[in-house]
Amino acid sequence: MTKSNVMEVPPKGGFTFDLCRRNTMLQQQGAKLPKFRKTGTTIVGLIFKDGVILGADTRATEGEIVCDKNCEKIHYLAPNISCCGAGTAADTENVTDMVSSQLVLHRYATGRESRVVTALTMLKSHLFRYQGQVSAALVLGGVDVTGPHLHAVYPHGSTDTLPFATMGSGSLAAMSVFESRYKENLTKEEGMEIVSAAICAGIFNDLGSGSNVDLCIITKARKEYLRNYQQPNPRSYSRSKGYDFKIGHTAVLSTKITQLRQHVQVLEGDAMEEE
Amino acid sequence: MHHPQVLRSQMRWECHGGQEESKQEQIYVGRSLMGPPTPFTLMPMPGVPITHTQQPYVTGTSVLGLIYEGGVLIAADTAGSYGSTTRFKSVERMKAVSNNTLLGASGEISDFQAITQLLDRLIVADAMWDDGNDLGPLDIHNYLTRVMYNRRNKFDPLWNTLILGGVKNGVKHLGSVSMIGVHYVDNHIATGFGIHLAQPIFREEWKENMTLEEGTRLLEKALLVLFYRDRSAINKIQVANVTEDGVHISQPYALKSEWNLEAFKNPTASAAGSW
């Protein structure tokens, strides 16, 4: 292969891995790679009699730290389709936004309601093209003219079509609830009960999941997004008098005021307005 | 200068009264089904590090246990896996240690057999004192903790996670010891995959003073989830019941599993290319 001075642009999307060797060398010499924000997660989906119920926890982690206690993991794709995302938060956000935009254009082109398989195909072909480097594991659910559908999409681009699905670090805890309780033709109330029990199993048994339960119920008629449907982790103590400290609470021992105007010289232009 | 190997084989030759011993006592290269060829020495050689247990060979999967009103219930399946194949389907992974204690093990089966032999000697030695006091489940738990931890310190672990359950003088005991010596006591215990799949169910549904019926049903519920979702589990289980009166291990039996969900019959009818 001949070396050229100009870096070649890849044909149509996909990553170039030219800088990987240089990055590993830098890492070995002590440079730190930035930690990315993951949603170590419990996301689930379940098909019931009239449609699909999606559930998710609300904890986002950066390494060992919880960086967002109440993030939104159920993303909008279309008026009748939603998608839960696990893996790297940036990847799930952006891939669902991108497919959501593509679906709008598709709706204009076809003049019809979006189908779940359309979203599925767009997601899986994008993820496959990036060979797993886009770390997005998704639970895609929706109701279209052909009925309710639930799919699990993996970062490398493979998909599963299932009556109930779980993804993320808490998927085993949630799956144990589903496997012991799932039946066919559940009612909406039973479905919501099982989905929130599965998410709670993830929240309390998995360290990567926590905080609250979000639900999204999609039926032929409408989509109900129940943000913070359950909040099983309230702040257990808060000061009953509130946190209002009036002047005089802390003793003032001495006061020294320095006029900064004396130290600042305006060389050019206008002095800033006093406010 | 004589090589130490040569000296020793010469000695053996002399002990055997002149019979030809053509065994090569050099370094063997052992081949295992589950890893690259590992060199091991039958006797120490200068310059070559002594290596002990690096990986398990025939393994058992999860063991589950819980305390009910009459004593302790412990259950396990009867599979012995050799890497990714189910080599043995009738392995007893639970053994009565004494009249009031039961040991269950996951991990390397040969190490479990060595531990049962060790405990047999311990119990016999204790019985010979004939002092009216026998070792109870807590004593055996502590003894095993010491054994496992000391082996770990020598970098030669017994590759097991053990579950110890029993009743003595009305006090019920259920505890676990891992291959590195981590030990704890709880009302419900699981090892291996059971930690992820069965513990969430136990934490939700275990309660004080369950009847034998309720306890067995809870164990079977968890074992069914494990059969569905653990690849090394089989549908042939044994449940052991330890009470003050004695240990009773059931005959192996199978659980009723459900594979005929409508949604599994033609999953990709609406999503061509997925499975």
Image (cartoon, coloured by chain):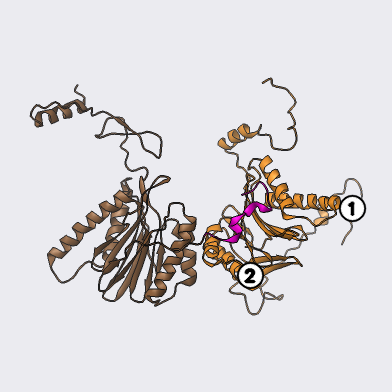
Chain colours: A orange, B brown
**Residue for badge 1:** A271
Q: Does B213 sit above or below residue A122?
A: below
Relative placement, left or right, of A102 versus B53 is right
At label 2, counting other C-alpha atoms closer than 10 Å, the crowd grade (few under 14, some 14-19, many 20 or more) is: many
Relative placement, left or right, of B7 versus B68 is left
Q: Does A219 sit above or below residue B160?
A: below
Residue lying at the far left of the rendered structure = B17
Relative placement, left or right, of B176 versus A21 is left
Q: Chain of mark 2?
A: A
Residue lying at the far top of the rendered structure = A2
Q: Depth check: A245 or A170 in front?
A: A170
Q: Residue at x 40, y 54 (%)?
A: B61
Dividing the picture into quadrants, the one containing residue B33 is top left
Q: Chain of mark 1?
A: A
Say which element carries label 1.
loop
Q: Position of residue B102 (x, y in %)?
A: 29, 64
Q: Position of residue B184 (x, y in %)?
A: 37, 63
Residue A120 is at least partly visible in this image: yes
Q: Position of residue A204 (x, y in %)?
A: 54, 65
Dividing the picture into quadrants, the one containing residue B126 is bottom left
Dividing the picture into quadrants, the one containing residue B46 is top left
**Residue for badge 2:** A192
In which quadrant will I find the N terminus of chain A? top right
Q: Is residue B271 magenta?
A: yes
Say which element carries label 2.
helix
| Type of amino acid under label 2 | Met
Q: Position of residue A262 (x, y in %)?
A: 82, 54
In which quadrant will I find the C terminus of chain A? bottom right
Q: Report the span colored magenta.
A: B259-275
Q: Does A134 sit above or below residue A114?
A: above
